[in-house]
Amino acid sequence: MSYFTHLECSEPCGAGHYDPRVEQHLCSCGAPLLARYDLDAAKAWKKESLAGRAPNMWRYRELMPLLDGQEPLTLGEGWTPLIHAKRLGSDVGLSRLFVKDESLNPTNSFKARGLAAAVTKASHLGARILSIPSAGNAANAMAAYAAAAGIDAKVFMPRDVKVPFIRECELYGAEITLVDGLITDAGRIAAERGKPLGWYDVSTLKEPYRIEGKKTMAYELGEQLDWQFPDWIIYPTGGGTGMVGMWKAFEEMEAIGWKSSTVRPRMVSVQAEHCAPIVRAFEQGAERSVMWPNARTVADGLRVPKAIGDFLVLRAVRESGGTALAVSDADMVRDMRELGTREGISAAPEGGAALHALRVLIEDGRVKPSDTVVVFNTGGALKYLDVLN
Ligand SMILES: *Cc1c(COP(=O)(O)O)cnc(C)c1O
């Protein structure tokens, strides 16, 4: 069973509850909607019940957005390894450095979590055609889950996206449109085409369930670290669902008594030097970001010049006492290689960016040798091999 009750605006706009039994996208005020649960009743749900459950993200189904009798669509997403990176840790002077290796998800990235949840819900709601704008990984994940659900998938990606992302969408039978520009342009074109035809739009934060898939990363960190949460979470940020999802998970775990202290991990949002809208807004003390002109980076997942949930990411970073920082492409590729050569981990440049950000924070003296740090490797190396040439 699930304690899922309703959807609610992420802003205090006064719009009231939204019914999850029908298709919902944004709030009438334009802000993202969030799934809400009866957290008081959920106090009856005990951690001990997790033992023996299937090793995928639906082990937390009591706080997943399933209505009574609904079953998830799964390809085995989630429950990825949390690797104690001892060799890299000794390189940087940390005895408790962990890498959460999201490359082991279906379709090679943590996007599988969000899209498993979103496609599950779309399928329960009877959607026939799904559409998504993507920088690459989200399109692959959506195409795979749509194939598994028997639903048509339309994906919109930048024309210069790396070839493996295109081929993998073809593999799952998605219809591909390549657009001039970035993910934001892809989003505009997908909406223009799809709206009149009633396509179900699964853009980041424009439907409420991708966050619910991503939040399971924080539940897993708790379970894998014996409910001692890390001091730092270092996370490569594009659209921001990972950050927003994990922050929401901490709130839920505190409410149901799974997380004893209200001290949360410091959240570090890592972006690319030439596409760093969140970092700039953070430094300027702004509540929202500004569209980044001429955004470019080899880390496709970070090529998001403006995120609809930017204010939620910034809020999480600030409330956590964390920070936001930008990394050059050369540095992220160098640390992508380090994850490979020192730990045997297949890392995307995005994962390399997170590791590099950690080095900067250690050098600044912000991360202490006794701190427990989790670096997220959000995807695998295989679709990015061109950057190693
Ligand atoms: C999409 C993506 C990101 C950014 O994730 P958000 O949660 O949308 O900020 C980071 N890394 C990889 C590999 C991605 O595909």
Image: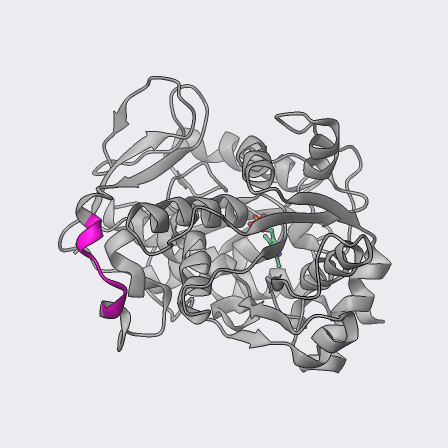
Q: Nearer the viewer, residue 324 or 210?
A: 324
Residue at 68% across, 41% down:
182
Q: Residue at image x 59%, y 41%?
A: 317
- Image coordinates for residue 322, horizontal then vertical, percent: 63, 44
Residue 279, percent from left and from top: 72, 38
Give residue 44's quadrant in the image: bottom left
The N terminus: image quadrant:
bottom left
* Residue 194, position as x, y percentages in the image: 45, 35
Residue 138 to residue 355: above or below:
above
Segment colored magenta: 42-48
When asked about the image quadrant of residue 314, the answer is top right
Is 374 in the magenta?
Answer: no
The colour scheme is one colour
Principal SS element in the magenta part?
helix
Q: For the C terminus, which image quadrant?
A: bottom right
Determine the residue positioned at 65% across, 66% down: 370
| Nearest the eye: 202 or 209 | 209
| Camera sees residue 251 | yes
The quarter of the picture where residue 69 lies is bottom left
Residue at 45% over, 53% down: 214
Res. 79 visible in picture: no
